[in-house]
Image (cartoon, rainbow, N blue to C red):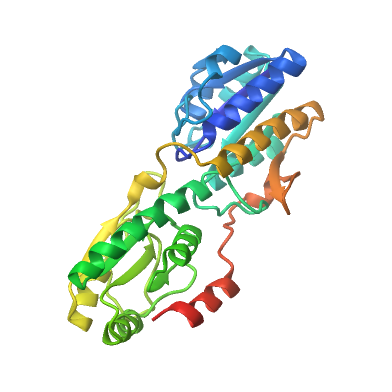
Amino acid sequence: MNIGVLTGGGDCPGLNAVIRAIVRKAQTIGGHRVLGFYDSWDGVLEKRYEELDISKVRGILPKGGTILGTRRGSPFDYADGVERTKKVFAELALDVLVVIGGNGSLTVASMLADDHGLPVIGVPKTIDNDVVGTDATFGFQTAVQVATDAIDRLHTTAESHNRVMVIEVMGRDAGWIALHAGVAGGATTILVPEVPFDIREVAEIVTRRHERGRYASLVVVAEGAKPKAGTLEIPPPKLDKFGREMHGSISQLIAPELSRLTGYESRVVQLGHVQRGGTPNAYDRVLSSRFGLAVVDAIYERAFGQMVVLKCGQIERVSMQVTRGKTRTIDLELFSGVSQTFFG
């Protein structure tokens, strides 16, 4: 059997652990051939790949990133992309292609499997934890720990200078990292894409905290957080080459406005790609390995069009169609309970 593997979208701690598990099980149990495609779908379209064996995945379990490289984009970006993909499947005699990716990559994988009949199986990954159909994605716990460690460190410097720290974390469409790291780090308030914020209310929370003698405030904000209409003027968003809004500046607008409204000095800390990089923690290594082992079982059972997921602690399968055009948002009850109890 010839098994293709690619990693798509943004990099993520745990990708190499999935690749390692697939290779080890496919070759140890069945003696199958595993082809790793470089740079996501570009590697498929351009037929750039490497045959992976156990010796080539030795030692990659704790490594961040992906040994295969990754990019955004898909065969659907080209008029002849699907036909070129089918041609590569035929030329390499691929029995299946495993797509390890987030919402975008899994949507592409679902379309190729269900709309064009290609044998494709998915593995969900993203530090944003926003893939519909699974209770968790690997990479998320590592990103939360990185953000929490940063928040812990920022508490002391903020207290030393009686400052407001506005800490921006990743989360374009869902505030999972902001919520979990904010709760774990004891944030003064948390701003997420799911709940538009009023900058005046944020300023009031900060002011109350300082008036009680707490000489620091930490505002944790997801990059995709948005203000309520008319409460904070923001410029029109720029778009990337894929037509998506480019985030990463909301904290730069929030901090000076908080300084103006409260009179306290505000500083911005954008954690950015440090959340993506580096070694995965133990939880993500284990989850990644479980996904990798389970996807080989799915291959044997010809579960094309499906992806392996985590449900109530068990690895199961669901159709990749559940991910199409959807985002798994935060638990609003948890957010409400946290805001009522801890904010301010």
Report x, y in % for residue 181: 45, 60
* Visible residue check, residue 313: yes
Q: What residue is drawn where x is 63% and y is 54%? A: 132
Quadrant location, the C terminus: bottom left
Report x, y in % for residue 149: 39, 54
Report x, y in % for residue 25: 70, 22
Q: Relative to 136, is 14 above or below?
A: above
Residue 196: which quarter of the image?
Answer: bottom left
Q: Left of 268 or right of it: where is 188?
A: right
Residue 303: which quarter of the image?
Answer: top right
Q: Left of 216 or right of it: where is 280?
A: right
Asked whether 236 or 3 is in front, the reply is: 3
Furthest toward the right, the residue is 301
Quadrant location, the N terminus: top right
Q: Relative to 173, is 194 above or below?
A: below
Report x, y in % for residue 336: 54, 77
Q: What residue is drawn where x is 51% and y is 75%? A: 338
Q: Left of 114 or right of it: where is 45?
A: left
Asked whether 225 or 265 is in front, the reply is: 265
Q: Relative to 337, is 223 above or below?
A: above
Asked whether 259 or 283 is in front, the reply is: 283
Please tell me how many numbered marks the rendered image carries: 0
* Visible residue check, residue 240: no
Q: What residue is drawn where x is 35% and y is 53%? A: 246
